[in-house]
Image (spheres, helix red, strand yellow):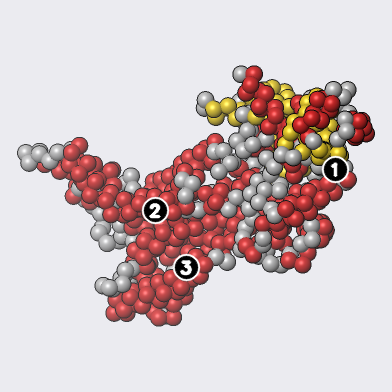
């Protein structure tokens, strides 16, 4: 038998309430400070390095995102560090917080399905982070216009927008992780720690583990030069299990038009290529497409898992 | 029938929370689901609301199946959970606005209704204060305001007087009686039997997941205590009066409690008791009739169950 009615009933009520909560929360005030400081830092550090080369580089805006000067990280590096933490900060207590406040049974006794609550919470957090991201992005673009005085071209703007989308997909992954743990653990502190642990695992340790795995699976044989190539390929394959790698690769392709391949390239493959010529936007997008879809797929998978667990959970604490 | 269940059962693994429950609530009555903590009251309520699925049996609430038609059911049923919680940073008004939106009420109508229910619960003055500053009693009243916001046909209240001081509890019970006057069927659960017995038309007593006794309070007393009438008297000399009292028609038993004698009788036989005391040459100092309380019914019932076992 089918259940009656649509799972979307009440979705927007939940969405707007959650979003209002996020926007008026103390977490958001912290984000605002961070946004401002990081935008200033990113523009300052990149313009310092770019001032000399203005006019030589056709993709100046993209360089603003990726160029850093030593103590300060580049804008992109900062984002890949900041956004997972921001996503975790917004969603780690999404569901268990309702239990802790004794509000869950009251909300679920209203004529809505659990679907609406979970989807509403996820979308509200994503929209909030999207807003943060957009603010940050516009600040950086605006400031770099002022500092460098060179307007970006159409293709550059297109690449920058795609970069924004990829970043949102990457944020969604960490939102999914935090949401899943908020369903899994009844204690908000535990779920925050677990989410941060997962993030640390991928940010710091996965690189090492991928290397060890690649060496174990495809041992290097000094008499077989091809084994080195196969090992490099295995390494890339293993490291792509990490959303951080996927995001980094997608950005590489999108923000650097000169990049024509992600992963090991043989000299024979470069035959006839004119090195240094940029790819067109469509080709770069094609290059980043698998990473792009993988990020979205991981997000959906995590959300689905959280959804199933939440549906099976008892309302009583 | 407003609520009808047939063989409703809920198991968590091997633990049986509710077993073979047959309930029937008529429109307009106040029904008390009574019993100690952990006896299956809340689980029953959650099954009626479709918030948890029964392992066996069926339930019909307002003619709807809670598991399959939860939306139209929850539109007409108000629920006040035990230890109800609100969003502490939001004001009372904002909390109710959220509920109104979840119910899909149009804005204009929602505002009118919120104002109305807040006034009715005596919360209009504090409508713009964050709920975090509310006392337990105020939260409970806000919870009832939320129930009324839907204009429900059935209100299910889980432990509505828990944690309230006696005065607040009394006041709150008065508010619940107000619902009955409005024609709303009320189902409430409590483990504080003496508090709710006054407002319940009918009660069902739970024990370890089973509904063991059901009926009107006086009927239950009659059934379990043998005599529904309990007469206390202070008389002198107590010892020698006992046989005379025991011999009176309609007396089930006579007990001595401290300096008092306690009679259980099938009728109000105070005049006969007074006559008997005087006839036996005793001195009568006080004589009063006690209404049996549910607590006693409950305790006595389980004493008997244990003796039987």
Q: Which image quadrant is residue B73 in? A: top right
Could you tell me which residue is drawn at 33 percent across and 54 percent down? A200
- Mark with earlier residue (2, 3): 3
Q: How many marks?
A: 3
Q: What residue is shown with label 1?
A: B285
Q: Is residue A158 visible?
A: no
Q: Position of residue A294 (x, y in %)?
A: 41, 45
Q: Percent from the top left, x then y, of residue A120?
A: 59, 50
Mark nearest the camera among 1 and 3 is: 1
Is there any visible trace of residue B240 in the rendered image? Answer: yes
Identify the chain of the residue marked 2, using the numbered disc in the image: A
Secondary structure type for disc 3: helix
- Give left or right: position of B222 versus A278: right
State the residue in front, B224 or B179.
B224
- Whole-angstrom CA distance, mark 2 to mark 3, is 20 Å
**Letter of the chain that mark 1 sits on in the rendering:** B
Q: Residue at x 87, y 42 (%)?
A: B183
Cα distance between the residues tagged 1 and 3: 79 Å
Q: In the rendered view of the protein, which quadrant contains the N terminus of chain A?
A: top right
* Residue at numbered disc 3: A31
Q: Nearer the viewer, residue B157 or A122?
A: B157
Q: Is residue B57 above or below residue A125?
A: above
Q: Residue furthest front?
A: B281
Q: Quadrant of the C terminus of chain A?
A: top right
Residue at image location 78% in from the left, 54% down from the top: B171
Which residue is identified by label 2?
A193
Query: In this rendering, do the residues under marks 1 and 3 share a single chain?
Result: no
Residue B134: x, y in percent?
67, 62
- Pointer 3: residues within 10 angstroms few (<14), some, or many (20+)? some
């Amino acid at each position: 038998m089918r259940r009656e009615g649509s799972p979307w009933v009440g979705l927007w009520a939940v969405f707007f309430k959650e979003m209002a909560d996020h926007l008026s929360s103390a977490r958001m005030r912290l984000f605002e400070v961070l946004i401002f400081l990081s935008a200033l830092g990113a523009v300052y550090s990149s313009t310092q390095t770019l001032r000399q080369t203005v006019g030589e580089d056709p993709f100046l805006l993209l360089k603003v995102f990726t160029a850093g000067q030593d103590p300060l990280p580049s804008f992109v590096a900062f984002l890949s560090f900041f956004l997972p933490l921001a996503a975790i900060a917004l969603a780690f207590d999404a569901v268990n917080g309702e239990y802790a406040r004794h509000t869950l049974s009251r909300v679920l006794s209203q004529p809505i399905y659990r679907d609406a609550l979970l989807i509403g919470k996820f979308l509200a957090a994503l929209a909030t982070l999207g807003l943060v991201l957009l603010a940050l992005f516009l600040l950086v673009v605006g400031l770099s216009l002022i500092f460098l005085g060179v307007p970006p071209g159409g293709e550059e703007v297109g690449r920058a927008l795609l970069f924004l989308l990829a970043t949102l997909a990457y944020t969604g992954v960490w939102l999914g992780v935090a949401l899943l743990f908020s369903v899994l653990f009844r204690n908000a502190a535990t779920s925050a720690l677990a989410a941060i642990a997962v993030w640390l695992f991928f940010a710091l340790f996965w690189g090492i583990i991928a290397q060890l795995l690649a060496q174990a699976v495809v041992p290097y044989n000094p008499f077989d030069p091809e084994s080195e190539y196969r090992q490099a390929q295995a390494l890339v394959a293993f490291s792509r299990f990490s959303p951080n790698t996927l995001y980094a690769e997608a950005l590489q392709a999108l923000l650097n038009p000169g990049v024509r391949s992600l992963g090991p390239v043989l000299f024979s493959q470069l035959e006839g290529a004119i090195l240094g010529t940029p790819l067109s936007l469509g080709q770069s997008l094609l290059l980043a497409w698998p990473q792009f879809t993988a990020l979205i797929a991981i997000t959906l998978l995590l959300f689905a898992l959280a959804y199933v667990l939440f549906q099976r959970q008892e309302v009583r604490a | 029938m407003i609520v009808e269940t047939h063989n409703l059962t809920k198991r968590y693994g091997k633990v049986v929370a509710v077993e073979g429950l047959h309930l029937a609530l008529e429109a307009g009555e106040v029904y008390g689901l009574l019993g100690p903590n952990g006896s299956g009251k809340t689980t029953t309520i959650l099954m009626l609301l479709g918030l948890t699925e029964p392992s066996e049996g069926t339930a019909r609430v307002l003619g709807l199946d809670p598991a399959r038609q939860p939306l139209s059911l929850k539109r007409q049923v108000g629920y006040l959970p035990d230890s109800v919680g609100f969003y502490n940073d939001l004001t009372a008004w904002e909390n109710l606005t959220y509920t109104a939106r979840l119910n899909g009420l149009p804005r204009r109508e929602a505002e009118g209704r919120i104002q109305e229910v807040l006034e009715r619960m005596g919360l209009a003055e504090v409508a713009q204060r964050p709920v975090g500053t509310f006392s337990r009693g105020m939260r409970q009243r806000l919870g009832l305001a939320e129930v009324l916001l839907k204009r429900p046909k059935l209100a299910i209240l889980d432990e509505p007087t828990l944690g309230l001081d006696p005065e607040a509890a009394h006041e709150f019970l008065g508010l619940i009686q107000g619902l009955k006057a409005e024609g709303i069927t009320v189902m409430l659960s409590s483990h504080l039997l003496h508090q709710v017995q006054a407002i319940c038309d009918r009660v069902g007593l739970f024990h370890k997941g089973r509904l063991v006794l059901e009926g009107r309070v006086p009927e239950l007393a009659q059934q379990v205590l043998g005599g529904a009438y309990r007469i206390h008297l202070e008389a002198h000399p107590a010892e020698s009066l006992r046989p005379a009292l025991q011999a009176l028609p309609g007396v089930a038993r006579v007990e001595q409690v401290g300096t008092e004698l306690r009679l259980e009788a099938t009728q109000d036989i105070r005049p006969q008791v007074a006559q008997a005391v005087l006839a036996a040459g005793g001195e009568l100092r006080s004589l009063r009739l006690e209404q049996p309380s549910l607590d006693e019914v409950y305790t006595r019932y389980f004493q008997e169950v244990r003796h039987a076992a």
